[in-house]
């Protein structure tokens, strides 16, 4: 068995060597290197995907570390995308990561091509920009958001983010790490299924929340596609 197949042995048992090898030719852009972005990069970064672009203009702050699992004490003041790039590449020698220390708006002007774009941002206007960019470029993308103890995930194909959500500059309320990791893991599962050619139902919004008694509830909403 080759070294790369030994590295990905458990995944190969899921989908075979040919599919695993095909991931080396895939390119994924993760927009945002905060809570969702960190968990996404860690979950997908060692899966065998050949290239990642990590896009974020922000620096690590002490208040980020509790929920942004790619960072540790001592990283404060460093560029988030650069720190996360080093972590992902240190975990998997078969992945190339390029860090773009800039806004999504500037990144979009580069005209790069990707198999998938994943939203790891925390503000509505940037998500609206991602939505517009992906519609204009016929680009597959996965949305995720978290707040308090609830979150949402959707693989957008024909539906439009702005047709479903009101775009404003509202800031999210408090948040803890587990829900961030949970929503990011759902995004990552949709991503890896799509990239390996497994079935993925698109344009369905998944909403996860806890009720007043602490029961986890998942709702599904079919989004308008015209």
Image: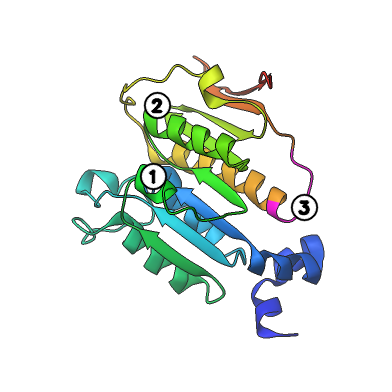
Q: Which mark is residue 21?
A: none
Q: Residue at x 48, y 52 (%)?
A: 111
Can residue 87 be seen by looking at this rendering?
yes
Q: Magenta segment, which residues?
A: 195-200
- Residue 2 sits inside the magenta stretch: no
| Tag 3 secondary structure | loop
Mark in front: 1 vs 2: 1
**Left or right: 135, with 195 as reference point:** left
Marks 3 and 1, how far apart at CA: 27 Å
Work out which residue is located at the far left of the displayed protein and give it: 77
Q: Which mark is residue 197?
A: 3
Q: Residue at x 62, y 67 (%)?
A: 48
Work out which residue is located at the far bottom of the displayed protein and give it: 2
State which tag comes first along the sequence, 2 or 3. Answer: 2
Image quadrant containing the C terminus: top right
The residue that disc 1 covers is 104
Marks 2 and 3, how far apart at CA: 33 Å
| Tag 1 secondary structure | helix
């Amino acid at each position: 068995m080759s070294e790369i197949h030994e590295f990905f042995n458990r995944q190969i048992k899921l989908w075979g060597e040919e599919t695993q090898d095909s991931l080396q030719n895939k390119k994924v852009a993760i927009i945002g290197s905060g809570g969702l972005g960190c968990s996404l990069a860690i979950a997908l970064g060692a899966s065998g995907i050949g290239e990642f672009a990590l896009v974020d203009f922000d620096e690590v702050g002490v208040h980020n570390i509790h929920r942004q699992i790619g960072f540790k004490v001592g990283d404060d003041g460093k560029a988030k995308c650069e720190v996360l790039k080093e972590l992902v590449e240190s975990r998997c020698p078969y992945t190339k990561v390029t860090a773009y220390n800039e806004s999504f708006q500037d990144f979009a002007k580069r005209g790069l091509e990707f198999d998938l774009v994943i939203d790891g941002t925390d503000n509505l206007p940037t998500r609206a920009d991602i939505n517009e960019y992906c519609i204009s470029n016929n680009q597959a993308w996965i949305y995720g958001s978290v707040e308090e103890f609830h979150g949402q995930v959707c693989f957008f194909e024909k539906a439009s983010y702005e047709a479903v959500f009101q775009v404003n500059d509202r800031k999210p309320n408090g948040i803890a790490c587990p829900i961030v990791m949970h929503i990011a893991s759902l995004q990552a599962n949709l991503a890896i299924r799509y990239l390996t050619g497994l079935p993925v139902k698109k344009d369905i919004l998944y909403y996860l929340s806890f009720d007043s008694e602490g029961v986890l509830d998942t709702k599904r909403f079919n989004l308008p596609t015209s």
